[in-house]
Image (cartoon, rainbow, N blue to C red):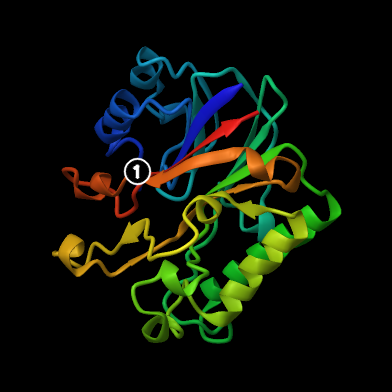
Amino acid sequence: MVFTLATWNINSVRLREDLVQKLLREEAPDVLCLQECKSPVEKIPTEGFAALGYTHMVARGQKGYNGVAILSKIPLVDAGGMDWADLGHARHVAGRLENGVVIHNCYVPAGGDIPDRAENEKFGQKLDYLTQMRDHFRSDTPQKSILVGDLNIAPREDDVWDHKALLKIVSHTPIEVQHFTDVMEAGGWADVTRADIPTGRLYSWWSYRAAEWDSADKGRRLDHIWASRDIGSAGHSSRILRAARGWTQPSDHAPVFASFDL
């Protein structure tokens, strides 16, 4: 079975329903994982997605905040969701495809602006969330699994526009990168995107604050596609659809793609 998967922080699925439909029409991934849907599940605009062939969905929603959904052309069933760090947030949902592959769709907390848990509760929540992810995957090693989403960390020096300038900026601080690495190592996860594109600057997010985001190109790679160790070599054809950041009333994130032979 060959299928293409995309992950995208849509920053309100109802506000940007037309952009989701545009992506589905023009790029036609078999599976689309959305984060920051900002909608209760029952208000996600599924009718238009179903008309394009995406008749299957598993989701966790919440009014105005967070929210994750997996849209699929391929049949899938709900495989649960975790509330890591006990925040009461809709930040994780898992779906199981017919071939047994489990897709984890995650939205890690952004962590606020100050990288100090003593001064910033949100930063502490982010670290706790990652710690519980690590512990979960350490005790329940993933097999035949894919993990995607807005993980809100750019781990490598070439995942940000200026490594030294961002070392004290939330999303690229050493403590966050270490927590990120711990989660990967605990689950034996492989970074599919960087396996395909091993060198060079690579971004999936550009701030709304930068009017000239494209020419300034001060981006970060916050969105990721991982595969468990047993299927790590099955991922290929990775790319980031940078053009989507320039669509009308866009999300500040661009979709990330990969294909899998499983």
User: Where residue 257 sits in the image (x, y, percent)?
Assistant: 44, 41
Horizontal side, residue 124 vs residue 24: left or right = right
Q: Is 247 rendered above or below residue 159?
A: above
User: Where residue 199 sits in the image (x, y, percent)?
Assistant: 45, 63
**Residue at label 1?**
12
- Does the image show residue 33? no
Q: Amino acid at mark 1?
A: Ser
- Does the image show residue 138? yes
User: In the image shown, does 164 or 248 lie closer to the viewer?
Assistant: 164
Q: Is 25 rendered above or below residue 175?
A: above
Q: Residue furthest right?
A: 139
Split into 4 quadrants, where in the image is the C terminus? top right
User: In the image shown, does 55 or 154 lie closer to the viewer?
Assistant: 154
Instruction: Say how many tags the image has.
Output: 1
Using the rendered view, name the quadrant where residue 102 is placed.
top right
Residue at 52% across, 71% down? 122
User: Where residue 167 sits in the image (x, y, percent)?
Assistant: 46, 84
